Amino acid sequence: MDAAAIPALPRGVRLHFDRVRGDWVLLAPERTVTLDAVGQAILSEVDGKRSFGEITAALAAKFAAPRDQIAADSAAFLGALRDRLFLEVRP
Amino acid sequence: MTVPPPIAMLAELTHRCPLSCPYCSNPVELARAETELATEDWVRVFREAADLGVLQLHLSGGEPASRRDLTDLVRAAREAGLYTNLISSGIGLTEARLAELDAAGLDHIQLSLQGTDAGMADEIGGYRGGFVRKMQVAGWIKAIGFPLTLNTVLHRRNLHQLPRALEMAEEMGARRVEVATVQFHGWALRNRDALMPTREQAKEATRIVAEARVRLKGRLVVDYVPADYHSDYPKRCMGGWGSTGLNVAPDGTVLPCHAAQTIPHLTFENVRHRPLADIWYRSSAFDAYRGTGWMAEPCRSCDRREKDFGGCRCQAMALAGDAGAADPVCVKSPHHAALQARAAAHAAATAPLIHRTAPGRPVPAEPVVG
């Protein structure tokens, strides 16, 4: 994923805290994706304004982790969501 | 056995519908308007559902737009915290009403498609002018920006229109298309001679879908329900009985699936009399086919038993006369060969469409089942 690209949740896809099961989930048409701590951390940075590069920099600082590793993991996670049309990526 | 909370609820707000599709999944005995739950009942049920763990609410029917309180129901569902999906033919949705639904927080719309031109769509839907109206509604949905799934139901008469249906989904701006071969429950069971696809048609549909999934990747998600009479393994019906989802009928009856009332020995509870959580966790109908404990052979020792849970209980009832038997779609069912022969005979037959009736109207006589 390009560092300047801006990921955003499209209309009809939203983060939701499932208070009954105690999980963060991504709600989408006919689909519910249960998020692990990593997925939740990545998506909580996606605001439709900041670029992929800014998001991965923020995550690297927050978790004191190598930025390359964070970028690779985030690109894989967000890319899979994009393939299912649960995420838009604006160039 | 630990019973997980349900994820999805189908709220059949009404059985009333301007269309009369011959494969309608509503029961043959339709609920009359005066037996429908009131607005405040549905609002309470939505809250109970959210408290129980339901995340996804599907507002269906009949035609949910036939309920005058649809906007209030959508608002209440969103306030309860539910992802709210409207499943509609489009008939009864005006531009103004769609704007109200938008303001009320509706998350997603599924628009049904009976055919890709007026001749096919209006004949199948039994409603003249329906196709033109639907195209107008699709335009308003796109203009507002609602996320859209186009729901196509395919059968022998319209399977050749599948390529055009996929194009239309793209033109409408849909993110997702459901390509569902008709499932033979409810009214469709009476129309097998008119609707059963041929084996060749079923194979062609599978090929078209596989090709479209590659071609449309990243633009349009294609969900596919193959023709199960022509399959070798059954569907994991409802994600497993009493494990994932529940249906509430227009009168408040709570069902493990929309066809469960065809299983005569089951008794069903009603949200008018019992809390939804109580019905989910502690009622005989939901317990009847949960998990694997109810299974007989060939399911009991089958390595697929937790994959498809023996298939559809209602189909086992309808075709094998025993809701506890393996779904006859399965190659391991002793009824499988007979079912495949019957499917071929239905596909080779000709018969007029038997459209569904309106709630409270006499039900047409059942054809002789061969």
Image (tube, coloured by chain):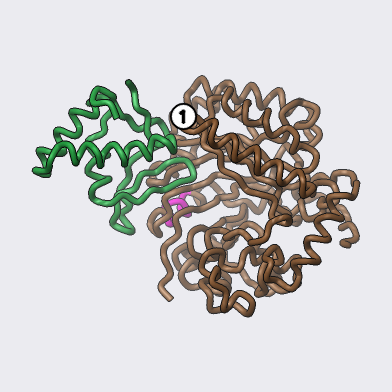
Please provide percent x and percent y for residue B24: 72, 47
Quadrant of image for the N terminus of chain B: bottom left
Asked whether residue B45 is drawn in magenta, I would say yes
Residue at 55% x, 27% y is B97
**Could you tell me if residue B362 is visible in this image?**
no
Quadrant of image for the C terminus of chain B: bottom right
Q: Is residue B296 left or right of B182 when viewed as pictured?
A: left
Which residue type does callout 1 highlight?
Answer: Asp
How crowded pointer 1 is (Cα within 10 Å; few <14, some 14-19, many 20+) is rated as some
Name the residue tied to disc 1.
Answer: B102
Q: Is residue B105 left or right of B58 when viewed as pictured?
A: left
Against A17, is B3 above or below? Answer: below
**Could you tell me if residue B200 is visible in this image?**
yes
Residue at 39% x, 43% y is A27
Task: Report the predominant secondary structure element of the magenta stretch.
Answer: helix
- Front residue of this view, candidates B212 and B278: B212
Q: Colour of chain B?
A: brown
Q: What residue range appears in magenta?
A: B43-49
Instruction: Chain letter for mark 1, please.
Output: B
Against A22, is B338 above or below? Answer: below
Please provide percent x and percent y for residue B306: 51, 68
Note the chain letter of the green one. Answer: A
Q: Is residue A85 left or right of A56 when viewed as pictured?
A: right
Residue at 85% x, 53% y is B346
